[in-house]
Amino acid sequence: MLIPLSILFDLDPLGYPLSLLDDPVMWGFKGFPIFYSNLARWALAAEDICFKNSLLSYFFRIGKCIPITRGGGIYQEHMNEALERLSDGEWLHTFPEGKVSQEDASIRRLKWGTASLIVRSPVTPIVLPIVHHGFEEVMPEKFWFGRRPPFPLCNKSINIFIGEPMEFNLPKMTQMAISMSRNLHNPTRGWPILSPSGLDEAAQRCLYTSISEQIQTSMECLRSSNKKLSEAKSLNSGQVEE
C-alpha cells in the first residue's frame, strides 16, 4: 500500500514553512487534482493559531487539518489521529520544524515527530520530500514595520521540486537502534514502550534520530541541487535581458 508522507522543505530554510501560505497555496500548481477532496492531503496545524476559536476550528477541520499542540511532545493525543489517517492510506503533510522561517540556511537537526509517525504507523509510510522556493516573497514576515503584509503579494515566482520517494527498512533499523541504545543513559521523558517491537525510550531515540538524519540528508541534497538550479536560471535570465 502506498502511503506517501510528504515532508516539506524550502530551498532557503530547513524543514519548516517559509510562510503561512505554503501549505494551502502550493497544492494549486497546474495538474494537481485540487477539486477532489478525497485526494487532498491531511496536514498538521498549530492548535494555538488555527484552532483558537470555533470558526477557525471549523474552517481548518474542513480543510483536513489536524490540531497539534506545540510543545506537547510526540506522544500527544492528536498524533493518534495522524496515525489513524496513515492507517487509512491517507496522505499526511508535515513540517518537521513546526515554525515559519525565512532565513537562508542549511537544514538543521529535525524534530522527532515525523520519525515517530513513520515508526508507529501500522503500514510503513513512503516519504515524499518536497522543496519549494518563493513563498517568502509572497508573504514576507517583515514586510512593513516588521510585520507581514495584510494580503499576499502578487507577481512572484514560486518553484516547487519533488524528490525521489524514500522507504525505510524498519525491522533492520529497529535492531540497530536496540543495539546502539544499550550503553546509553540519557534522562527519560516517560515515553511508552512501543509494541510489538518492544522498543524502550532509549532505543526509540536512536531510531528516530536515524530516520530523521536520513530525511535531513536527502532534503539537504535536494535543497542544494535545486538552489544551484535556481541560481543558474537567474543568471541565464539576466544574460538574456542584457
Image (tube, rainbow, N blue to C red):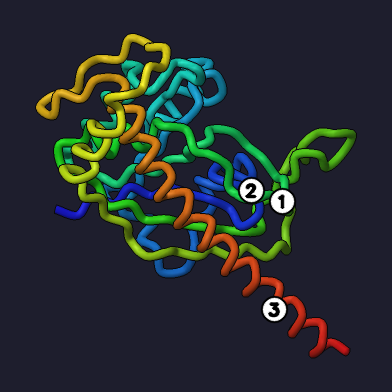
What amino acid does circle 3 point to?
Ala
Q: Secondary structure at mark 2?
A: loop
Give the answer, above or below, for where 201 lies relative to 23.
Answer: above
Q: Residue furthest top?
A: 190
Query: Can you give x and y, in whole percent of width and height, for residue 22 in the image?
Result: 56, 47
Q: Earlier in the sequence, mark 3 or mark 1?
A: 1
Q: Residue pushed farthest left?
A: 196
The amino acid sitting under disc 1 is Asp
Identify the mark nearer the N-term, 1 or 2: 2
Q: Position of residue 194 (x, y in %)?
A: 19, 23
Mark 2 → mark 3, Cα distance in angstroms: 19 Å
Marks 1/2: CA distance?
5 Å
* Secondary-structure class at tag 1: loop
Q: Mark 3 falls on what kind of element? A: helix
Give the residue furthest to the front: 183
The residue to which callout 1 is attached is 104
Identify the residue shown where x is 68% and y is 65%: 157
| Marking on residue 30 | none
- Write down the residue under mark 2: 13
Residue 149 placement (x, y as % from top left): 77, 40
Q: Is residue 62 left or right of residue 168?
A: right
Tell whether label 2 touches label 1 (CB within 8 Å): yes
**How many numbered tags mark residues here?**
3
Examine the rendered structure and indicate whether residue 61 appears above or below residue 32.
above
Determine if residue 140 is in view.
yes
Q: Quadrant of residue 81?
A: top left
The kind of residue on which mark 2 rests is Pro
Q: Which residue is mark 3?
A: 232
Quarter location, residue 171: top left
Quadrant in which residue 78 is drawn = top left
Classify mark 3: residues with Cα within 10 Å, few (<14), some (14-19) or many (20+). few
